């Protein structure tokens, strides 16, 4: 086992950190306050190759691995968790097209996604099917060279602003083997959006329902064959869980660094907070949890890169641990900042609000336990 990053990985980690600190961090509080989707900032990230991190180089992707992606997302999220998380979803959707699309689909769609001339969303969850994703009800019926889609997707990041929606809908009976995957483009007739949701965090990315009412989508926009959609959706989520875990690491690390500085500077009872043993122990636990979570995320990424048969379980383990630890570290940081941590003049509360949802999305942490237990017990 080699726990060290390669020279190349250290180089792009440093490049990403410098970019995030200069281009995102100064603006993140304002984006959050105004609920602004930072299009220009995302496109600047795309100029560095961050919009198609593990998309193949043939169609303008960076051709990197899943471990590389976790390094990049941790650095970006240390500046703005919400914006990094949207970029992670965009990457997941782009990879699904690269992995399961035809050459024509890849050539037509990927160059605009990897530059972020176009933005992408992933549409699986519905009002009536969240954790039970295979129970989705949205349906597509073939009509000649088109499919007619009807149904609603819920909690869609980028809903109304994205240009393409990688969407799972039912094309047959009631089982997971009757679900297919489509790329729905924003100008598709019959596509509309619900109101922008009002959220606790993730304010730099709009969230809305995506509504299909006799929405016509060309057969040429189907990814894979009919009935392969659930398999495609789950394959995307393995990497998505690692990405969102890495975003939790970035937010937690930013809070940890701020807390360490605060303990050294703040004085109470005639001495620095750093001299109180109880607070030193808290900081030690935060550092240990952060390091353990990072190791789990990187093991999951290495497993996915290697095609390990246990990769899905490793990704679920990493997601469960890292997102729980990420929120706990941010919450401990707020406590150690005291009243200042609760103020919007300081960054802790923003990180706390943004990482909280990571324990819910890409499969709740309860579902991660289901996946792990099923693999361990064989049922």
Image: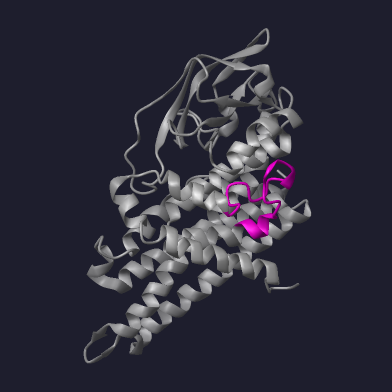
Residue toward you, 249 or 26: 26
Q: Split into 4 quadrants, where in the image is the N terminus?
A: bottom right
Quarter of the image for the C terminus: give it: top right
Picture layout, residue 215 above or below residue 109? above
Q: Is residue 192 above or below residue 356?
A: above
Residue 324 visible in rendering: no
Q: Main secondary structure of the magenta part?
A: loop
The residue that appears at 59% across and 24% down in the rendered structure is 169
The percent position of residue 347, horizontal first and vertical second, equals 33, 63
Q: Look at the picture and state if 253 lies above or below 263.
A: above
Q: Is residue 298 visible?
A: yes
The answer to which image quadrant residue 258 occupies is bottom left
Q: Looking at this view, is 117 or 185 the one in front? A: 117
User: In the picture provided, is 294 more to the left or to the right than 76?
Assistant: right
Residue 45 sits inside the magenta stretch: no
How far from the left and from the top, in percent, is residue 84? 49, 52
Instruction: Please identify the quarter of the rendering in which residue 71 is found.
Output: bottom right
**Along the line of sight, which residue is nearer the eye, 298 or 276?**
298
Q: Which residues are magenta?
A: 48-69
- Relative image position of residue 196 (x, y in whole percent): 35, 33
Residue 229 locus on image (x, y percent): 67, 29
What sort of colour scheme is used for the picture? Answer: one colour
- Left or right, 198 with respect to 229, comes to left
Q: Residue at x 67, y 71 (%)?
A: 5
Residue name at image x 68 percent, y 7 percent: 144
Farthest residue to the top: give it. Answer: 144
Snapshot quadrant of residue 283 = bottom left
* 56 in the magenta segment: yes
**In screen coordinates, is 45 left or right of 195?**
right
Q: How many marks?
A: 0
């Amino acid at each position: 086992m080699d726990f060290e990053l390669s020279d190349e990985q250290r180089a792009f980690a440093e490049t990403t950190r410098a970019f995030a600190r200069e281009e995102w961090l100064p603006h993140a509080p304002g984006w959050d306050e105004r609920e602004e989707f930072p299009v220009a900032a995302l496109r600047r990230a795309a100029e560095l190759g961050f919009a198609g991190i593990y998309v193949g180089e043939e169609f303008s992707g960076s051709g990197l691995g899943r471990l590389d992606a976790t390094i990049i997302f941790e650095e970006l999220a240390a500046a703005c968790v919400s914006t990094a998380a949207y970029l992670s979803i965009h990457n997941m959707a782009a990879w699904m097209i690269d992995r399961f699309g035809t050459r024509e689909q890849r050539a037509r769609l990927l160059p605009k996604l990897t530059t972020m001339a176009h933005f992408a969303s992933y549409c699986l969850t519905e009002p009536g099917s969240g954790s039970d994703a295979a129970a989705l009800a949205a349906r597509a019926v073939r009509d000649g060279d088109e499919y007619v889609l009807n149904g609603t997707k819920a909690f869609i990041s980028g809903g109304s602003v994205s240009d393409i929606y990688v969407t799972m809908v039912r094309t047959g009976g009631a089982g997971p083997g009757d679900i297919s995957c489509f790329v729905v483009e924003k100008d598709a007739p019959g596509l509309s959006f619900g109101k922008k949701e009002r959220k606790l965090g993730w304010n730099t990315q709009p969230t809305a329902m995506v509504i299909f009412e006799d929405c016509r989508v060309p057969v040429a926009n189907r990814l894979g064959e009919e009935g392969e959609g659930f398999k495609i959706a789950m394959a995307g989520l393995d990497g998505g869980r690692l990405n969102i875990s890495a975003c939790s690491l970035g937010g937690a690390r930013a809070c940890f660094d701020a807390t360490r500085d605060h303990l050294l500077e703040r004085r109470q009872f005639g001495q620095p907070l750093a001299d109180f043993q109880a607070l030193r122990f808290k900081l030690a636990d935060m550092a240990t949890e952060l390091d353990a979570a990072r190791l789990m995320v990187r093991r999951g990424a290495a497993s996915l890169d290697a095609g390990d048969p246990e990769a899905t379980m490793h990704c679920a383990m990493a997601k469960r641990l890292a997102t729980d630890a990420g929120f706990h570290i941010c919450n401990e940081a707020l406590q150690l900042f005291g009243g200042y941590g609760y103020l919007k003049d300081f960054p802790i509360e923003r990180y706390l609000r943004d990482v909280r949802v990571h324990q819910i999305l890409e499969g709740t942490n309860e579902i991660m336990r289901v996946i792990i237990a099923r693999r361990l017990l064989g049922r």
